[in-house]
Image (cartoon, coloured by chain):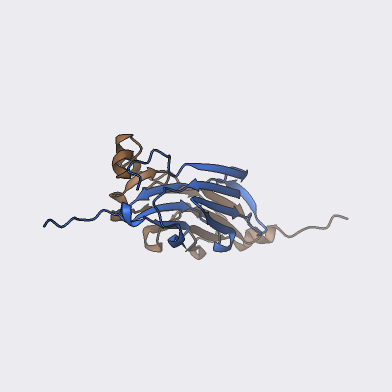
Chain colours: A brown, B blue
Amino acid sequence: MNRLFDEFFGRTLTRGEEFERMRSPNVDVSETKDNILVTVEIPGMTKDDIKVTVRDNILTLSGEKKQEKEEKDANYHRIERSYGSFCRSFELPTTVQFDKVKAGYKDGILKITLPKSEEVKLKEIPINIS
Amino acid sequence: MRLISFLPIFDSFDFRNGNGFDPDMDIFETDKDFVIEAEIPGVSKNDMKLNVENDILTLEVEKKKKKEDESFIFKESREGKFKKIFSLPNDVESDKIKAKFENGVLRIIIPKAKVLIPREITLN
């Protein structure tokens, strides 16, 4: 009954085509002594839906956030989340050890660790000024 | 039993204290439940508080800054405190509300009272 009246007054929303594109996820890029860290906020996904590739010095993150069928058919009161596919690429400094890149997904956060090459680390030795 | 509910449901008041931390939320209903889904990546269960009193549901989240010694090259994520107060629809079983946090998504399930669940009527 409530639903009927909600629809009558135009408050019930339905998901349409325009929601099928996912908003670009938030990305943080930071640097520690040994690594460059790329952190991506992509909640509600599984490991298998995420792809991380490094080609030449381009890091590409892509994936698809799927919505459960049951939810697609539901009546909506508020829609803020977005679904669909996303893709972001970053040019990496050439001082990264590309063969040692690691990635993990936990609590909706994809974290990529890019170890700096040894030469760069050596350059960071402090020099005492006399 | 009321037949018509003109009261706004799931209206919410927001309190924010941070640099724009504002989780995306969906609210929808199935035959049996009302469901609130909030995207809160990078927060642990312990930093969330969910409270129901009468027909008011309060969600409080604190996303803390990372402690690691890192300097940002660029940053798009946000931290801070966030509090949302929802007015619940009338015909719900508020003592049976359940919540689950998985892969950065908080899912709150609010069962509808029996009067709202569609049922088939047998014809004699």
B8 vs A126, nearest the viewer: B8
- Report whether A71 appears left or right of B49: left
List x then y, in percent, for residue B91. 39, 51
Q: Decide which of B48, A111 is in the foreground and name it.
A: B48
In terms of depth relative to the viewer, which is nearer, B124 or A65?
A: B124
Residue depicted at x 44% and y 44%: B10
In the image, residue B89 sits, relative to residue B70, either above or below, namely above
- The answer to which image quadrant residue A130 occupies is bottom right
Residue sitting at the far left = B124
Residue at image coords 11%, 57%: B124
Closer to us: A53 or B89: B89
Residue A101: horizontal and vertical position, in percent? 50, 62
Left or right relative to A77: residue B87: right
**Residue lying furthest right:** A130
Residue that extends furthest to the top in the rendered view of this protein: A9
Q: Is residue B44 visible?
A: yes
- Residue B69 in percent (x, y) is at 67, 58
Q: Is B75 displayed left or right of A54 in the figure?
A: right
Quadrant assignment, res B63: bottom right
> Is residue B77 visible to us here?
no
Residue B7: image location, x then y, percent: 42, 39
Q: Which residue is at 76% across, 58% downward?
A: A126
